[in-house]
Image (tube, helix red, strand yellow):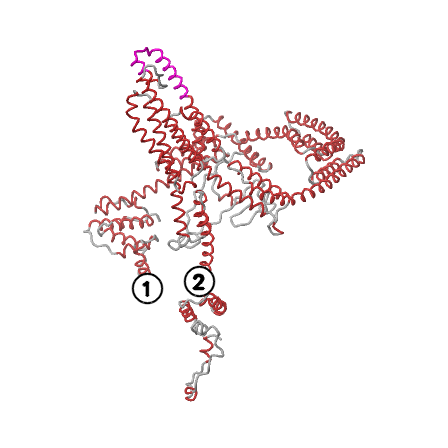
Amino acid sequence: MSLFSLRKSAPQSPAPESAVNSPAPSKSASAHPLDALTGGAFSAPTSGERTARIREWLTTSPSLEQMSDVFKELSHRDRGASKPLKEKLDELKRQKSQEQIAVEWAAKAQAMLDQARLNLADALAWQRDAARAGAPLSREPLSGLKQALGERVKAIEDLQHRVQVEREAAVLIAQRIEVLSTKPWKEAQASAPSLSADVSHWQEQVAGLTEDPQWSSVEAKFPTMLDASRSQLQLVWEAFAAALDQTVAADADPQAPLPAVPVWADELRLARGQDVSVAAEKNNQNTQAAQEKRARAGAEIDKALTVLERELAEGHGKATPKAAADVRGLLKTHGRLVSAELEARAHAALSQAGELEGWQRWRADQLREELVAKAEGLLRAPEGQRLGGRKMQETLRSLREQWKTTDQGGQANHALWKRFDEACTEAHKVVETWLAQVRQQAEVHKAQRLAIIDELKAWAELHAASTDWKAQVRELHRFSERWREAGHLSEKAFAELQPAWKDVMHKAHAPLEAAQAESTARRRALIDEAVALGSAPQLRIDAVKALQQRWQAEAHAVPLERKHEQKLWEAFRQPIDDAFARKSSEREKAVTALSAHDQRVLDASRALEAASASGDAQRIREAMQSLELALAGQADAAASKAEAVSQPPAAQAEVATDSTTEQSAETVASGEPAEDMAAQDSEADVKPAPAAPASPPKKVVAVRGDDRPGMKKAEPAARDGRRGDRPDGRRDGPGMGRADARGRGPGASSPWREEREPRGPRLGDAAFRAQRQAIEAAQMSLRKLAAQAHGEVLTQLMTAWEQRDAEQLPTAQALGPRVNASSRNAWVSALAKNAGPLHAEVLLRLEIAAEVPTPAEHLSERRMLQLQLLTRKHAAAPAETWVEDVASVLASRFDAAAARRLQTVLKSLLKR
């Protein structure tokens, strides 16, 4: 029961005294068992109190089992109150999972620290993988293990760096020894003690490196590198010391042998008084050969080193080991002939390649483990989600290709390969089962195709004498569809059956192909006849129809291939279409020939276009008037009248006869009945009727419609001008076109036709389009000129207000029909007065009259004014007093904002 129902059912009358004094009933029977544990959370009346008591109970650090029991019971009663419990339980669950993860990764880290030899790649990957797994690296023990691993990794990297430094130091000492071999032997003898001390000091430092506790964790290439530097330096130093001892002995005893150092030997020869030219020449030759040898060795190493550096820059894992091996081989072969700079560059690249190889080995193992997991997961999928045979085959092939690619980038891992191969072999059983099913289906499909071939042979023998070619085409197409849908076969089996099918199909098509060949020959003969008919000077329509009927009969009798039949039909239709097109073009040429009236309209249209381009309004109006006269035929009448006055009477009679003939031709072209034309000709022969003068248009006295100010007058419905239409909406009867009951003849026109304004002669298409385009362009130019003039008028008006100069005010004619002379005089008087303040209501009235928007900051004032205008009885509307309001604005001081608002208002008011 809710709290609302308890309150609603409580009695309104006060409780009796006996009820007040009686003890309260015990709640222990109805209280929840966990209510005491949670401090009354279950018996609290509101959700907020339950939540508060739960939070207080959580501060007492209850056990996980107690919190789980309370959450289980309370979540069914009040989810809001159980939310703190859920958050606490989720936090404990996360902590528990993180503790388990921390124990797991701490064990891995401790195992790596306990190893005598630490793999740098595994140590660097531990932190990344632990963070990805969600291990709390910022808490103990992971934070301490992380720091310990970092320190050990740093110690190993420092040791490797020291190895490289000592190697470079060995190279520098060897260079010093080589330089001393080119100096006098006494100078070398003087520098020998210090050089010996440096060599001894270097050997001590190298021995200290090998005794470092982290020496076992150094990569395998660094001990090898250090041993090579030690042996090379020892050999160089021993050779130098022996040569120096031999030189000292040769200096003391002239009979002693000379040293192998050329410079020292030449020096001893000079001391003994011997000739050194031959020896010097020999030494020069040896030196030149040695330089050439050094140059070749340097070029080879530089080329191989360039390849290695490019592979390292691009990050190629497959080609890097081979390039590094090439550089190592060349260094072993020509190590003594290489300069120190090139050797240092080579060793730096080799060290980087070694690091990349170590990383590739670790990455290759990771990729192999992923491939093993994928291969083992192929059969662990649920029954409905396992891959089919073909998909399984493609997946296994892809996995094996990926394994091969991984082996190319690093050393092989036989343990992982064994697991991978066993998983792939187990998964391939699904492929074998599928292949067996495919083979069974292939046998069924092969038998089905052989049955289709036998059926086609029987059908061909049965219909060998049939002439129903359309039915044969349908049957053969059905056989082809059945062959196409007969099921999948292997390429080998399909290649065996396809020739037999083609042979049988060719034999079945042989009668049809023969009939099609004969039909094609007959159609080509019809094409030749069509060409002859089309090239004839007089096109015979009956012969064309008969030829087309013969073609249709042939097409219905023997069907051809769609593309071939379409080509033949186009070849048959082309000459006939060309003949009709030629006839139509001749007819169009005769129809579209320009008459004298069309030429005058074209000339007037060109003149109007030139006037529109000039931008002169008066010239445009004159050109438009000339074009209207040309359209009405008045220009022709004026020209013919002037010509008739200047000609003799005989010529005038000939001209009248020609005009009658032209009227007859126009009547025929317009499609009027021949009887009317004959009647007109007879009337013209009997008595030439003088042309009746055009009656002037009647002045409109009244128009039916709404004549209130500002309302648009209704336009009379236009007649469509069809034959027989009347102004009152009725039409002539069936016999009114020939002769009516009043005695008018067939050629007589209806009485209402006399009321229509006389129209000029009919225009051709080119002249009609030209005059329409010219009139539209002229009207557009006039509108543009009017807009420009309106803008100039407003600018002059604003300038006159700003400078308070009445002489600059535009004239009444320029201001437009809505401003008369008295209104302009009122504006002039306003400008002549001294400028006073501007009332805001005036601009608002003007904007209301012009129905233009008001600036946002004055919208509330405009609404207030509109409400006030509704309450003012017998007051003039703003649309009636806008002239006086403009005068009030002009009488005030000039303001830029007010000027913009006034200009916007006048732009609308002066155009109406």
> Separation of disc 1 and disc 2 at Cα?
68 Å
Q: Which numbered marker is on residue 871?
A: 1
Residue situated furthest left in the rendering: 834
SS under mark 1: helix
The reply to whether callout 1 and callout 2 are in contact (CB within 8 Å) is no
Query: Is residue 88 left or right of 661 when viewed as pictured?
Result: left
Total labels: the figure holds 2
SS under mark 2: helix
Q: Name the residue located 40 percent from the left edge and 49 percent from the top edge.
A: 146
Task: Provide the major secondary structure of the magenta segment.
Answer: helix
Residue type at mark 2 is Glu
Task: Tell me if residue 4 comes above or below residue 455 in the rendering.
Answer: below
Residue 457 vs residue 176, the one in the foreground: 176
Residue situated furthest bottom in the rendering: 18
Snapshot quadrant of residue 459: top right
Foreground disc of the pair 1, 2: 2
Q: Is residue 278 magenta?
A: yes
Q: Badge 1, how many Cα within 10 Å: few under 14, some, many 20+?
A: few
Span of residues in magenta: 266-295
Q: Which numbered marker is on residue 724?
A: none
Residue type at mark 1 is Thr
Q: Find residue 761 and report its horizontal and vertical position in percent.
A: 49, 36
Residue 173 vs residue 611, the one in the foreground: 173
Identify the residue position indicated by label 2 in the image.
87
Task: Tell me if residue 390 comes above or below residue 282 in the rendering.
Answer: below
Q: Find residue 851 and report its horizontal and vertical position in percent.
A: 35, 53
Specify which label sits upstream in the sequence, 1 or 2.
Answer: 2
Q: Find residue 805 and report its horizontal and vertical position in percent.
A: 21, 45
Residue 15 vs residue 70, the one in the foreground: 70
Q: Find residue 825 and report its horizontal and vertical position in percent.
A: 24, 49
Query: Is residue 863 left or right of 760 when viewed as pictured?
Result: left
Q: Does the magenta stretch include residue 599?
A: no
